[in-house]
Image (cartoon, rainbow, N blue to C red):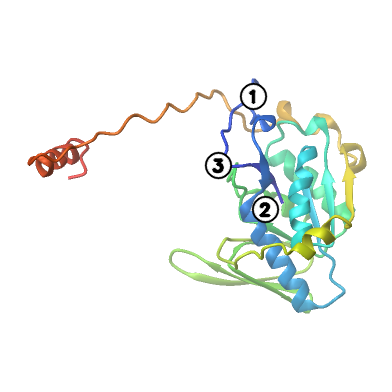
Amino acid sequence: MKYVPDATGDRHFADDLTVDRDDVDGLLSELDEYAVEQALQISENTGDDVEITALTIGPENAKDALRKALSMGADKAVHVEDDDLHGTDAIGTSLVLAKAIEKAGYDLVVSGMASTDGTMGVVPALVAERLGVPQVTLLSEVSVEDGTVKGRRDGDTATEYLEAQLPAIVSVTDQSGEARYPSFKGIMAAKKKPVISWDLSDLDIDAKEIGLEQAHTSVESAAQRPARATGTVVKDEGEGGKQLAEFLASQKFI
């Protein structure tokens, strides 16, 4: 899961053209809430021996995203934090995630379809490639039975039914089912659940492999979005309809 800047906040770029995370509040990516929900449903349908681990990479405040997942019902959390991660792109992120997933141990990795800030949607596939396991992505329905993960992918022209043997990686869409709201009991219980912290050395990753300097993508320039212009007010003094039609025609709406 990913800790992202609040889309309703006033976001800015830092001097190195990365997002200035100190200048805006962060939260758990909304699309990753669907992944947490599907993991919880798989656990409920499979049995008591399922353990759900929430994993994120990010700054200190990224623990807030983990606490949200824990309050929803995840059992424990892993937080990868290291100053050398600053500016890491999707390729580098997939390396860190793959190493962390291997270290934590897994049968099934459930991810959101994309992050709400980068919106690339490629990280699940990249992680699957690094781990050498099947990927079943963009699912609107997912289940696990007898060591197999099954899912439904809804496209514009067709619906596909897919399955893969575990271990595997899946990503789920916002059509997979509304995420549950944390209860007061869940919020209180989350405070007692373990949050494990790792850095790059714990994952045997050289800082030269990740970070802004090693990123395969970069922002060349950025400009402040212009302020919204004052709208046109049409006063109806008998010619309002005509003025409105002329305005719509000037904007090529009619």
Of badges 1 and 3, nearer the viewer stands 3
Of badges 2 and 3, nearer the viewer stands 3
**Residue that appears at 22% across and 37% down:** 251
Q: Element under label 1?
A: loop
The quarter of the image holding the C terminus is top left
Count residues near mark 1 (Cα–Cα under 10 Å), then give few for <14, some for 14-19, many for 20+.
Answer: few
Work out whether residue 174 or residue 148 is closer to the camera in this orientation and state it. Answer: 174
CA gap, disc 1 and disc 3: 18 Å
Q: Residue 55 at what x, y percent from top left?
A: 79, 52
**Tag shown at residue 125:** 2
Work out whether residue 193 or residue 108 is closer to the camera in this orientation and state it. Answer: 193
**Residue that appears at 83% across and 53% down:** 101
**Residue that appears at 77% across and 40% down:** 61
Q: Amino acid at mark 1?
A: Ala
Q: Residue 140 at what x, y percent from top left?
A: 58, 67
- 217 w.r.t. 170: above or below: above
> Quarter of the image holding residue 77?
bottom right
**Tag shown at residue 14:** 1
Work out whether residue 222 or residue 137 is closer to the camera in this orientation and state it. Answer: 222
Work out whether residue 174 or residue 165 is closer to the camera in this orientation and state it. Answer: 174
> Quarter of the image holding residue 38?
bottom right
Q: Amino acid at mark 3?
A: Thr
The residue that label 3 is drawn on is: 8
Query: In the picture provided, is 171 more to the left or to the right than 40?
Result: left
Count residues near mark 3 (Cα–Cα under 10 Å), then give few for <14, some for 14-19, many for 20+.
Answer: few
**Residue farthest to the top?**
15
> Quarter of the image holding residue 188?
bottom right
Contact between marks 1 and 3 (CB within 8 A): the answer is no
Q: Residue 108 at what x, y percent from top left?
A: 77, 64
Contact between marks 2 and 1 (CB within 8 A): the answer is no
Q: Element under label 3?
A: loop
